[in-house]
Amino acid sequence: MEQGESMSQCVDTGFLTGAPVQELASVGIFEYRNIFTSHHKLVYRRINADVYVYALAGHRQDFPTLLMKRLLKI
């Protein structure tokens, strides 16, 4: 989790900015962003001065399924 915490700190300070989440952008939702590292994908959203981390997933995880579970809270 240490790498995830350092990623979220970089996002919070504005050092890193991510691209829109492709799966959400394809349906017109652009405010959620993602950042990739060698092992993880961080999905976050900035609201005013606050950063909310929604998912920290490994590259081997099926991200579309993880995203759908999060959206539907299954």
Image (cartoon, rainbow, N blue to C red):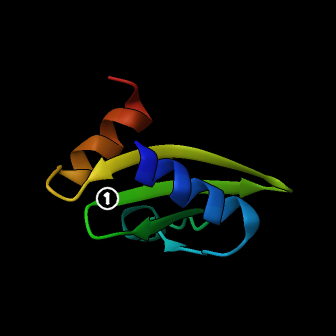
Count numbered badges in the picture: 1
Q: Quadrant of residue 59?
A: bottom left
Q: Quadrant of residue 66?
A: top left
| Residue closest to the eye, 35 or 5 | 5
Mark 1 highlights which residue?
40
Q: Residues within 10 Å of mark 1 (few under 14, many from 20)?
A: some
Q: Quadrant of the C terminus?
A: top left
Q: Locate residue 4 relative to residue 61 in the image: left or right.
A: right
> Which three-letter amino acid code belongs to the residue tagged 1?
His
Q: Residue furthest right?
A: 48
Q: Residue 43: image x %, image y %? A: 48, 55
| Residue closest to the eye, 68 or 52 | 52
Q: In this view of the protein, can residue 21 be seen by the observer?
A: no
Q: Residue 68: image x %, image y %? A: 32, 41
Q: In this view of the protein, can residue 66 be seen by the observer?
A: yes
Q: Residue furthest front?
A: 2
Q: Quadrant of residue 1?
A: top left
Q: Residue at x 56, y 46 (%)?
A: 53
Q: On screen, 49 above or below 15?
A: above
Q: Residue 30: image x %, image y %? A: 58, 68
Q: Locate residue 71 relative to residue 52 in the image: left or right.
A: left
Q: Residue furthest top?
A: 74
Q: Secondary structure at mark 1?
A: strand
Q: Residue at x 54, y 74 (%)?
A: 18
| Residue closest to the eye, 68 or 50 | 50
Q: Locate residue 72 relative to residue 8 in the image: left or right.
A: left
Q: On screen, 14 above or below 4?
A: below
Q: Residue at x 43, y 37 (%)?
A: 71
